[in-house]
Amino acid sequence: MNDLKDRVLRMSGSAVIKCMRCGKCSAACPSYDEMEYHPHEFVYMVERGDVEKLAASESLYKCLTCFACVERCPRGVEPGKVVEAVRLIAEREQGKNRLTPGDIPALLDPDLPGQALVTALRKYTK
């Protein structure tokens, strides 16, 4: 087993080996059309140890962390937690932040709730 796979499994607490690749998680994903890799693919790629490709993917930042995929999984795999773990690993690499706090105000809608700001800072900063 490689180190990145071990880190993702430990951070997510997800048993990716239980995934039967039914696709119910991806069917529930509101960001499905925007993602290069879908929730069920994330789980499978982590299972195979292909975390580097996921960490470089834009799909990490398309995930809304709504956990609809977690609710739909019949085996309790929790794909959203896998995505979050890979995102955290990617963000913790020095100089790999997707956005800086200064970038966020230009992307905001005036009607956006304040909680979205906190979530954005949590996701896109160290």
Image: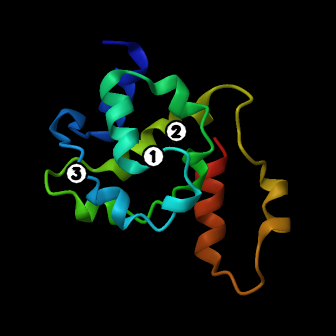
Disc marking residue 88: 2
| Mark toward the start of the polypeptide (2 vs 3) | 3
In the image, what residue type sits under mark 3?
Cys
Mark 1 lies on a secondary structure that is helix
Q: How is the image coloured?
A: rainbow
Instruction: Classify 10 Å Cα crowding around label 2: few (below 14), some (14-19), many (20 and above).
Output: many
Mark 2 lies on a secondary structure that is helix
Disc number lying in front (1 or 3)? 3
In the image, what residue type sits under mark 1?
Glu
Q: Quadrant of the N terminus?
A: top left
User: How far across and how far down the image is residue 63, in percent?
Assistant: 52, 56
| Mark toward the start of the polypeptide (1 vs 3) | 3
Q: Determine contact: label 1, label 2, CB under 8 Å.
A: yes
Q: CA distance from mark 2 to mark 3?
A: 26 Å
> Splitting the image into 4 quarters, where does residue 3 fall?
top left
Q: Residue at x 21, y 57 (%)?
A: 73
Disc number lying in front (2 or 3)? 3
Residue that carries the numbered disc 3 in the rendered image: 22
User: How far across and how far down the image is residue 76, in percent?
Assistant: 17, 52
Q: CA distance from mark 1 to mark 2?
A: 6 Å
Instruction: Classify 10 Å Cα crowding around label 3: few (below 14), some (14-19), many (20 and above).
Output: few
Horizontal side, residue 72 vs residue 104: left or right: left
Instruction: Classify 10 Å Cα crowding around label 1: few (below 14), some (14-19), many (20 and above).
Output: many
Residue that carries the numbered disc 1 in the rendered image: 84
User: How far across and how far down the image is residue 7, in percent?
Assistant: 38, 25
Most extreme residue toward the bottom is 111
